[in-house]
Image (cartoon, rainbow, N blue to C red):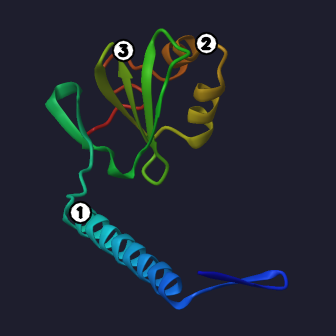
Amino acid sequence: MTYHIGLFQALDEPALLTRQHVQVELEVIVVRALALLLAQLAASPIVSETVETGGRRFVDLGTFECRDITRSTVLQRVCYDRAHRDLVVAINGAYDRYCGVADETVERLLGAPSMGQFFNQNIRRETAGSRYDCSA
């Protein structure tokens, strides 16, 4: 039974208890769902991506900032580690690593009208020991 008192509506006791019971049940469900989600997140392994570059060398991309490239027919992905000045690029599904690449060069690469042309003219090495070669 509901009683109207001016602008307010007062519920009789059984209806009020039922509403409080539903509220408590919902809170229990939400808390259990959050606990389950946190448990799943804690149990999930943190996986870092590792790619194979030329010479069967492996590079962990955990410290790299990677971007998938959709506007170039040459480059598919560009990953850069500012702290170590390492650049890893994917061309035709194969990764290659370039060392000692300045931040400005990477920014110019990413902003170039033709990323492939800029890469081929300014970064790509043709022989071992050339610019941006990684000695180790």
Verify CB contact (< 8 Å) between mark 1 and mark 2: no
Which of pointers 1 and 3 lies earlier in the amino acid sequence? Answer: 1
Q: Residue at x 39, y 71 (%)?
A: 30
Q: Label for residue 126?
A: 3
Give the quarter of the figure containing the C terminus: top left
Residue 7, picture quadrant: bottom right
Rounded to the nearest whole Å, what is the CA distance between mark 1 and mark 2?
44 Å
Rounded to the nearest whole Å, what is the CA distance between mark 1 and mark 3?
48 Å
Within-10-Å neighbours for mark 2: few <14, some 14–19, many 20+: some
Kindly state the secondary structure of the residue where label 1 is placed: helix
Residue farthest left in this picture: 56
Kindly state the secondary structure of the residue where label 3 is placed: loop
Q: Nearer the viewer, residue 95 or 71?
A: 71
Give the amino acid type for the residue marked by disc 2 in the picture: Ser
Within-10-Å neighbours for mark 3: few <14, some 14–19, many 20+: few
- Compared to 95, does 14 lie above or below? below
Q: Residue at x 46, y 78 (%)?
A: 23
Residue farthest bottom in this picture: 13
Q: Nearer the viewer, residue 1 or 15?
A: 1
Q: Which residue is mark 1?
A: 40
Rounded to the nearest whole Å, what is the CA distance between mark 2 and mark 3?
20 Å
